[in-house]
Image (cartoon, rainbow, N blue to C red):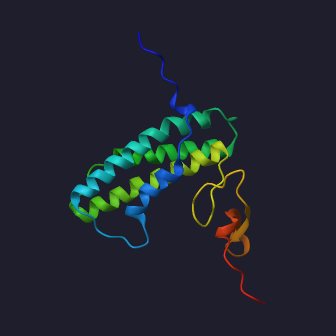
């Protein structure tokens, strides 16, 4: 007789690790990797998506039906499923673009997971802000498009002298 496994939703997901995995293909200086590396990244991102979908889906269904975070998460899940259904692209450049879409789906699901579990991410370094971390509000954007987020105290950019 085997012991029952605890549900995956009981273990927290380290979204910082999943986000770091996407940096290779979505980084600021894109490098066209070898085909074998692209296939490995595709396998990794597909696995991350398949891990996140049921967890984010359960978290969204646990919210009241009119909760916007849950509805947005379900839309993100639909998009991630569409990315999983994409067939392999022709040529290395086409395949890299497909893998980049998979990586963006991983990032979106990480955002939804963090939002649904109450994790606050630093707007500058994209790492979680822990309960003991010094953090402060951070405004970005201009006018009506301005948004407020939070950043670690050490990540706060220096303000120019007046």
- Identified at 37% across, 45% down, the residue is 46
Give residue 68's position: percent from left, percent from top: 67, 45
Most distant residue in the right direction: 162
Give residue 146's position: percent from left, percent from top: 70, 70
Report the front residue among 59 and 136. 136
Above or below — where is 78 with respect to 39? Answer: above
Report the front residue among 38 and 157. 157
Most distant residue in the bottom direction: 162
Quadrant in the picture for the C terminus:
bottom right
- Location of residue 138 by image quarter: bottom right
Give the number of callouts. Answer: 0
- Location of residue 104 by image quarter: bottom left
Indicate left or right for 128 with 26 as reference.
Answer: right
- Identified at 67% across, 73% down, the residue is 141
Report the front residue among 144 and 44. 44
Above or below — where is 68 with respect to 33? Answer: above
Give residue 95's position: percent from left, percent from top: 28, 59
- Identified at 70% across, 57% down, the residue is 133
Most distant residue in the top direction: 1
Most distant residue in the front direction: 132
Indicate left or right for 31 with 122 as reference.
Answer: left
Give residue 106's position: percent from left, percent from top: 46, 51
Quadrant in the picture for the N terminus:
top left
């Amino acid at each position: 007789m085997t012991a029952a496994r605890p549900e995956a939703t009981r273990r927290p997901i380290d979204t910082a690790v999943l986000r770091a995995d996407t940096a290779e293909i979505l980084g600021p200086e894109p490098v066209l990797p070898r085909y074998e590396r692209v296939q490995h990244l595709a396998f990794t991102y597909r696995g991350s998506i398949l891990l996140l979908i049921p967890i984010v889906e359960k978290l969204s269904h646990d919210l009241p039906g009119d909760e916007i975070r849950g509805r947005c998460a379900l839309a993100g899940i639909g998009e991630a499923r569409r990315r999983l259904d994409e067939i392999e692209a022709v040529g290395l450049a086409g395949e890299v673009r497909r893998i980049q879409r998979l990586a963006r789906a991983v990032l979106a699901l990480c955002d939804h997971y963090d939002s649904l579990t109450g994790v606050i991410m630093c707007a500058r370094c994209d790492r979680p802000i822990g309960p003991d971390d010094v953090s402060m509000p951070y405004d970005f954007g201009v006018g009506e498009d301005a948004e407020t987020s939070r950043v670690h105290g050490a990540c706060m950019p220096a303000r120019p002298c007046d």
